[in-house]
Image (spheres, grey):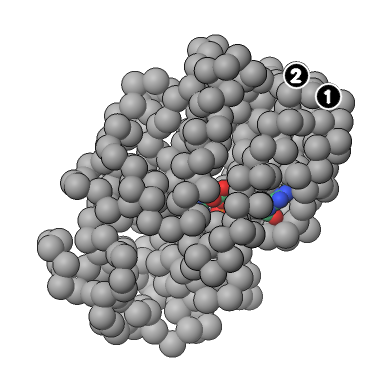
Amino acid sequence: MPNILLTGGAGYIGSHTAVALLARGHTVTLLDNFANAEREVPDRLAQLTGAEILVVEADIRDVETVATALADQNIDAVIHFAALKAVGESEADPLLYYEMNIVGTIRLFEAMQKAGTKNLVFSSSATVYGQPDASPILENAPTRVQNIYGRTKLVMEDLGADLVRTGFLKGVVNLRYFNPVGAHSSAMIGETPSGVPNNLMPYITQVATGERPYLQVFGNDYDTPDGTGVRDYIHVMDLAEAHALALEYILQTPGALTVNLGTGTGISVLDMIHAFERATGRTIPFKISPRRPGDVASYYANPSLAERLFNWKAKLTVDDMCRDSWRWQARRAGINDV
Ligand SMILES: NC(=O)c1ccc[n+]([C@@H]2O[C@H](COP(=O)([O-])OP(=O)(O)OC[C@H]3O[C@@H](n4cnc5c(N)ncnc54)[C@H](O)[C@@H]3O)[C@@H](O)[C@H]2O)c1
């Protein structure tokens, strides 16, 4: 089975993908600078999977170290998660985002070229669609970048496709994630947002633990069934499984492609609050606030390409997403009655 290197492999999506890859018999090496990951993650992964987890502590911009890791571990493909991901921060410090995401990706490509590694799966984002004309969104919908973070994702997608076209890489899959949520059902790995969460689920779970008094719901006058924003939430283990299948596909089928990863179902903020209450028995107090500038009413994927190419479909339900997010957050907060 192939040897895979995961940049940002100790982070939220990377660590779950490592579990999915190991379950399918791949060998994984995590490369991370631990800027946004807990140091215990590799040990927890080893405990969870029973596998040996190779870890290289390095920045993706360190070409020599990355090239050496690729060559020493005989790496067949890279899954590139390492990036900065906060939209607000990207607008406040564009050069930092160009440096970490775009220059970082160029340095990674240099290292891959040195080591002769020619296949890549790349973490992109549905944010590249900006304000879509309609949902469900297909991969050929226009890209309308609205912030620096989204810009870096689009540039990174294009760089990979250029290197395939010019023969420097064999295969690249750009995976456009919709809204990843949840955690491994063991509650041993999960998302660890620093500061006030930007995303709905970490916010809900922090209200459930009592860390925050209530949830702010931004807008209840959108043109959606209950007036609140609709998004395509996808369980991180479904997302992880899709990476493993995308990787196996690209190793067999050279080329560059871009694929949505979502469930194809839109869930409103109120739906999610009620699902969380149902799945966990906790009450989530909330207050309606004005709409946030730039927020879109409704946003969900057409995931049929992923099904056609990778034979992948999201399987886990909204209740699974709520239950697993809660188990993870409750465990971190020292709450044992879950
Ligand atoms: N979580 C989401 O909602 C979401 C949605 C769409 C796309 N994405 C993309 O998916 C990828 C993974 O996201 P995540 O949620 O797991 O984020 P994360 O912050 O949990 O993981 C990123 C990992 O990369 C590491 N890292 C960052 N910069 C690095 C560098 N220069 N060198 C080495 N390691 C570095 C961090 O320490 C962290 O472990 C990112 O590229 C992100 O933009 C995430």
- Taking the spot 35% from the left edge, 80% from the top edge, the residue there is 216
Residue 65 in the image: x percent, y percent?
86, 38
Name the element at disc 1.
helix
Asked where in the image residue 318 lies, by quadrant, the reply is: bottom left
Query: In the displayed structure, does residue 153 sit left or right of residue 62?
Result: left
261 relative to 332, above or below: above
- Taking the spot 54% from the left edge, 39% from the top edge, the residue there is 156
Residue 26 in the image: x percent, y percent?
68, 26
Residue 329 in the image: x percent, y percent?
55, 68
Residue 39 in the image: x percent, y percent?
78, 58
- Judging depth in this view, the residue of 318 and 90 nearest the camera is 90
Amino acid carrying mark 2 in the image: Gly
Query: In the displayed structure, does residue 280 sit left or right of residue 120?
Result: left
- Taking the spot 86% from the left edge, 31% from the top edge, the residue there is 68
Give the alpha-carbon distance from disc 2 to disc 1, as whole Å.
Answer: 8 Å
- Judging depth in this view, the residue of 222 and 321 nearest the camera is 222
Residue at the disc numbered 2:
116
Amino acid carrying mark 1 in the image: Ala
Q: Are marks 2 and 1 in contact (CB under 8 Å)?
A: yes
Residue at the disc numbered 1:
71
